[in-house]
Image (spheres, rainbow, N blue to C red):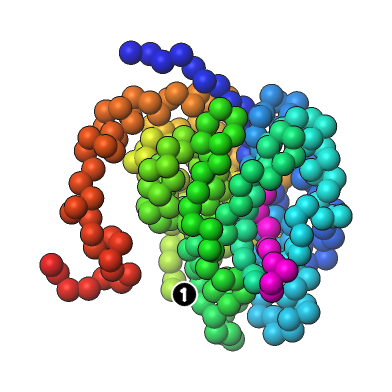
């Protein structure tokens, strides 16, 4: 049975390096240019990366709170990002944006928002799976201090109704955890969008380099297929002040197939006209959750945090 198509223009705006010396104004100019390109290629939604207004600062040991706070946004939108909201409203295009959030109550989150075609914020997500460490690894070539600089997100995994579908959000390391996609697909998401900053080297053990891109794509493709989801992932990549991060921004279909992928480590827009009905047959047959799932046998998944004794 072939469904009538429900088409959406999905754009992934991959960002090249943002260096310590780069101003927010210069970064927002790049974002606006990619937003314009996406619109010119008939996109309805643009996905920007995680922490996309500054360099990936969790790679640095920062003890001075005033210095740390310079990487955070205390309001959204604000004077720096307003040009992006204004251009999006003018062009009539929605976007996902990742940034570091400092709340009025003094709480720190790795956050993303979903903004609709009228530039209204229709969804906010705060990163739940925070990778890395909290101590200063003085011998490491770089740090990974998200557990030190951010709180675990308190908004849960939610979907937003936008563009004739339900769209879920997550951030970077979340894409490696099957629970992320399942929580969103159980809320009828048809598309999950995410940004990421993924170092190409591993400071914890001597891991073969080829695993970086392989595990990145594997995570997107398995999450998409096992939950009948479209997945759009936007990387911030290239070498930021000498610290390299992988590219590989991609659009993955509910079949698990990569339908578009970046080929550079610079600012690059990839666009695909996705059919939101492509997941229907998977949801009606192989992944008909109501028909096939057996939560009564999955209790350990919620009850246990770490691995423990056999049942
Ligand atoms: N970065 C990395 C990510 O999950 C990482 C951390 C790298 C985990 C490589 C595992 C392997 O892509 C962020 N920001 O989560």
Magenta-drawn segment: 96-106
**Left or right of 65: which side holds 310?**
left
Query: Residue placed farthest to the front in the image?
Result: 105
Query: What secondary structure is marked by label 1?
Result: loop
Residue drawn at x 75%, y 63% as measured from the top left: 73
Comparing 169 with 208, the one in front is 169
Spot occupied by residue 55 in the image (x, y as percentages of width and height)? 72, 63
Residue 106 sits above or below residue 80 on the image = below
Spot occupied by residue 291 in the image (x, y as percentages of width and height)? 22, 35
Comparing 203 with 229, the one in front is 229
Q: Main secondary structure of the magenta part?
A: strand
Q: Which residue is mark 1?
A: 204
State the quadrant of the C terminus: bottom left
Is residue 62 a member of the stretch shown in magenta? no
Comparing 170 with 163, the one in front is 163
Spot occupied by residue 240 in the image (x, y as percentages of width and height)? 70, 62
Callout 1: CB less than 8 Å from ligand 1: no
State the quadrant of the N terminus: top left
Is residue 100 a member of the stretch shown in magenta? yes
Mark 1 burial class by Cα count in 10 Å: few <14, some 14-19, many 20+? few
The answer to whether any part of residue 130 appears in the image is yes
The answer to whether any part of residue 58 appears in the image is no
Residue drawn at x 79%, y 30% as measured from the top left: 91
Q: Image quarter for residue 253?
A: top left
Residue 148 sits above or below residue 138 on the image = above
Residue drawn at x 74%, y 84% as measured from the top left: 64
Spot occupied by residue 243 in the image (x, y as percentages of width and height)? 65, 66
């Amino acid at each position: 049975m072939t469904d009538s198509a429900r088409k959406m223009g999905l754009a992934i705006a991959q960002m090249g390096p943002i260096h310590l010396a780069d101003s927010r104004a210069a970064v927002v100019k790049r974002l606006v240019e990619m937003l314009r390109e996406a619109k010119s290629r008939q996109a309805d939604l643009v996905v920007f990366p995680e922490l996309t207004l500054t360099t990936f600062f969790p790679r640095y040991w920062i003890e001075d709170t005033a210095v740390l706070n310079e990487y955070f946004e205390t309001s959204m939108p604000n004077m720096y990002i307003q040009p992006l909201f204004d251009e999006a409203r003018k062009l009539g295009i929605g976007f996902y944006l990742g940034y570091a959030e400092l709340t009025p109550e003094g709480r720190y989150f790795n956050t993303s928002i979903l903004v609709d075609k009228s530039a209204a914020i229709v969804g906010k997500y705060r990163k739940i799976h925070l990778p890395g460490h909290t101590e200063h690894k003085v011998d490491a070539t770089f740090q990974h201090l998200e557990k030190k600089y951010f709180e675990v997100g308190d908004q849960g995994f939610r979907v937003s109704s936008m563009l004739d579908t339900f769209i879920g959000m997550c951030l970077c390391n979340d894409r490696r955890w099957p629970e992320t996609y399942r929580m969103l697909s159980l809320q009828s998401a048809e598309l999950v969008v995410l940004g990421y900053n993924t170092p190409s080297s591993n400071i914890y053990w001597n891991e073969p380099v080829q695993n970086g891109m392989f595990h990145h794509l594997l995570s997107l493709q398995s999450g998409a297929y096992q939950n009948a989801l479209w997945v759009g992932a936007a990387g911030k990549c290239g070498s930021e002040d000498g610290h390299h991060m992988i590219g590989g921004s991609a659009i993955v279909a509910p079949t698990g197939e990569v339908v578009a992928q970046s080929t550079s480590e610079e600012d690059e827009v990839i666009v695909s006209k996705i059919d939101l009905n492509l997941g229907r047959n998977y949801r009606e047959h192989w992944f008909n959750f109501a028909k096939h799932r057996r939560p009564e046998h999955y209790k350990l998944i919620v009850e246990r945090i770490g691995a423990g004794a056999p049942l």
